[in-house]
Image: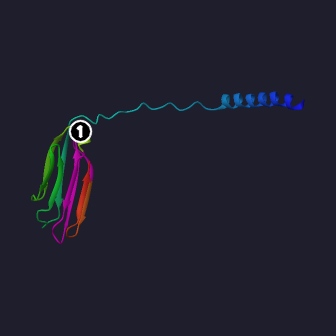
Amino acid sequence: MLRSVGAPILVAITFALTVASCAQSEPAPARKPVEYVDVYKDITVTYEVLGSTGVRSPRVHFVTPTGNSNQQPPIPFKQEIAMRSVADRPYLMVVHVDDSGWVMCRISIDGKVVSENRASGQFSSAECRG
């Protein structure tokens, strides 16, 4: 007989404590609105290759909307490409062919630098991803 009386009292005490703790808790912080980025907007990607004085033409590989480009241009090198979106995955790799000095790659999207790396030593490479 004690069991049947104890269970309702236990439920009542648990309920009262739950209500009391809910009444004293602080309200949940307001959620910030979700900001969406339009990944399908037209962008201008700028590929740049720089190097120390005396560095000859490094090997340069970069992605374009129509495929890949492999060049060995004089530095400083700069190429602007219109892309449909960052989904095109801008990519630039520079291979340093000299035995001294350094080379550097840089990718900018709509004028803002998004990736920059440097390499030194013969046949070292620097990669940049947008």
As for residue 106 lying within the magenta part, the answer is yes
Query: Residue 76 falls in which quadrant of the image?
Result: bottom left
Camera-side residue of 15 and 31: 15
Camera-side residue of 46 and 2: 2
Residue positioned most to the bottom: 99
Q: Which residue is mark 1?
A: 85
Q: Amino acid at mark 1?
A: Ser
Query: Position of 70 compared to 112: left or right?
Result: left
Q: Residues within 10 Å of mark 1 (few under 14, many from 20)?
A: some
Residue 22 higher or lower than 100, as above or below? above
Q: Which segment did they paint magenta?
A: 89-115
At 20% from the left and 70% from the top, the residue drawn is 122
Count of picture labels:
1
Query: Residue 123 falls in which quadrant of the image?
Result: bottom left
Magenta residues: mostly which secondary structure? Answer: strand
At 70% from the left and 31% from the top, the residue drawn is 18
As for residue 111 lying within the magenta part, the answer is yes
Q: SS class of the residue under badge 1?
A: loop
Query: Residue 37 falls in which quadrant of the image?
Result: top left
At 75% from the left and 31% from the top, the residue drawn is 14
Residue 60 percent across, percent down from the top left = 15, 57
Residue 15 higher or lower than 58, as above or below? above
